[in-house]
Image (cartoon, grey):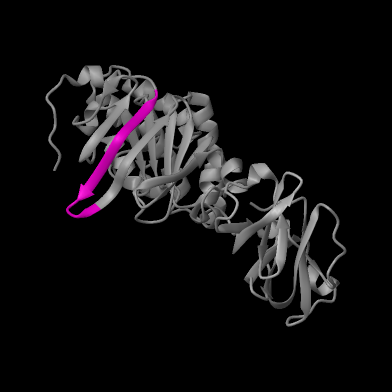
């Protein structure tokens, strides 16, 4: 249990500015859940904490909410130190995966509950405005049990927004929804955040969810941030093997730099060579490197293609599996020394149109040095 302060809560609830996490550590007995984490979330941004189970993302969110207290470090909004304050004293609201709606209250009464507890005279008017924002005003008189999961999620968002918090925390709020509804809610949450202009912090293990909604994504691993940046930057230029493998799929191989072609480093592994632009290579010459390339950057070829200055090829290899996923056809190819690589190609059953059968020897090629 944390040690709470007795400061007047009014000043805390009126805190405004960027969310700042300064050198925060959280220990549970001998286990370090969050390790010396420092982070600034700009006011009004949509920020995502992304990572696998146990990486510390939910613990970080709970410390921002006041549900946990840091073992060391500070949590601030602007210049106001929130460390040690109770959850209700903070200008922070949370939307949980479980929705946590009162079953005996109507939708309107659920949303108006917070303003009523604060003694605001226009609580019902504020509730109506929040329901209009999430397009749920027409269901204001229904009870939660009479609504779908997606509708309940919208009500939960409205109940969190009605208090006009400085920061809204989203703790994997879409995890209980089916795929189609989850994607619809992703768009809706981004629309709502843009309209209200509040700081949204979304915690999730779903990479597509984070990249769809967030302006900035921080990938967490073992209580620390591995890499932070815009979604496209993280996907296209990961700085660690963990980030490369966690965001999407990646074909990875241990390689070494064997020379330069102009200003482009040349990497080699098991007789295969790749040319990488200088800005995509962060490993000093002579040190071991992990070369990676996304499956959608590769193409299949019956024969080893003639290579120009902007092409590279691997193989021949053996086609092991073919899967049609609707958007693309996915292939698994065993390449000597490189292991099993994935290749994504758009189109319906390309493997049949090209006459490629399982166990046939084929090559993988790419253009424009798309790896890192």
Q: The N terminus is located in which quarter? A: top left
Where residue 214 appears, as percent x and y from the top left, is 52, 38
User: 341 or 19, which lies in front?
Assistant: 341
Which secondary structure class fits the magenta region best?
A: strand
Residue depicted at x 22% and y 48%: 27
Rendered view: 316 above or below 126: below
Q: Residue furthest bottom?
A: 359
Left or right side of 35 for 158: right
Rendered view: 218 above or below 245: above
Rendered view: 102 above or below 54: above
The segment highlighted magenta reads 18-31
Left or right side of 47 for 106: left
The total number of labels drawn is 0
User: 304 or 269, which lies in front?
Assistant: 269
Residue depicted at x 20% and y 41%: 71
Left or right side of 237 for 37: left
Where residue 342 appears, as percent x and y from the top left, is 66, 66
In reply to whether residue 337 is colored magenta, the answer given is no
User: 44 or 32, which lies in front?
Assistant: 32
Q: Is residue 196 visible?
A: yes
Q: Is residue 148 visible?
A: no
Where residue 20 appears, as percent x and y from the top left, is 35, 29
Where residue 288 appears, as percent x and y from the top left, is 55, 58
Residue depicted at x 71% and y 51%: 370
Left or right side of 199 for 253: right
């Amino acid at each position: 249990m944390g040690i709470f302060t007795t400061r007047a809560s009014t000043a805390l609830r009126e805190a405004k500015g960027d969310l700042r996490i300064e050198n925060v550590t959280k220990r549970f007995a001998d286990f370090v859940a969050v390790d010396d984490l420092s982070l600034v979330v700009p006011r009004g941004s949509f920020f995502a904490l992304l990572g696998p189970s146990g990486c510390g993302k939910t613990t970080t969110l709970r410390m921002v909410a006041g549900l946990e207290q840091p073992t060391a470090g500070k949590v601030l909004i602007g210049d106001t130190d929130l460390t040690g304050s109770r959850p209700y004293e903070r200008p922070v609201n949370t939307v949980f995966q479980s929705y946590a709606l009162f079953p005996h209250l109507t939708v309107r009464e659920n949303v108006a509950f917070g303003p009523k507890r604060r003694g605001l005279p226009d609580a019902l008017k504020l509730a109506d405005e929040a329901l209009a924002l999430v397009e749920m005003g027409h269901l204001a008189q229904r009870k939660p049990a009479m609504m779908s999961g997606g509708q309940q999620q919208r009500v939960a968002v409205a109940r969190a927004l009605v208090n006009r918090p400085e920061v809204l925390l989203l703790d994997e709020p879409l995890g209980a929804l089916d795929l189609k509804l989850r994607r619809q809610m992703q768009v809706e949450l981004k629309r709502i955040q843009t309209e209200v202009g509040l700081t949204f912090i979304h915690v999730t293990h779903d990479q597509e969810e984070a990249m769809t909604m967030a302006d900035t994504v921080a990938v967490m691993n073992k209580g620390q941030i591995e890499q932070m940046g815009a979604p496209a930057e993280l996907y296209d230029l990961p700085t660690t093997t963990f980030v490369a493998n966690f965001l999407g799929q990646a074909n990875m191989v241990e390689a070494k730099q064997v020379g330069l072609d102009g200003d482009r480093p040349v990497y080699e592994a098991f007789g295969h060579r790749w040319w990488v632009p200088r800005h995509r290579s962060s490993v000093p010459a002579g040190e071991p490197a992990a070369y990676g390339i996304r499956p959608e950057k590769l193409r299949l070829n019956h024969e080893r293609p003639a290579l120009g200055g902007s092409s590279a090829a691997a193989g021949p290899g053996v086609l092991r599996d073919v899967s049609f996923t609707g958007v693309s056809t996915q292939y698994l190819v065993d390449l000597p020394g490189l292991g099993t690589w994935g290749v994504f190609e758009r189109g319906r059953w390309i493997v049949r149109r090209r006459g490629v059968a399982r166990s046939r020897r084929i090559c993988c090629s790419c253009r424009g040095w798309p790896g890192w």
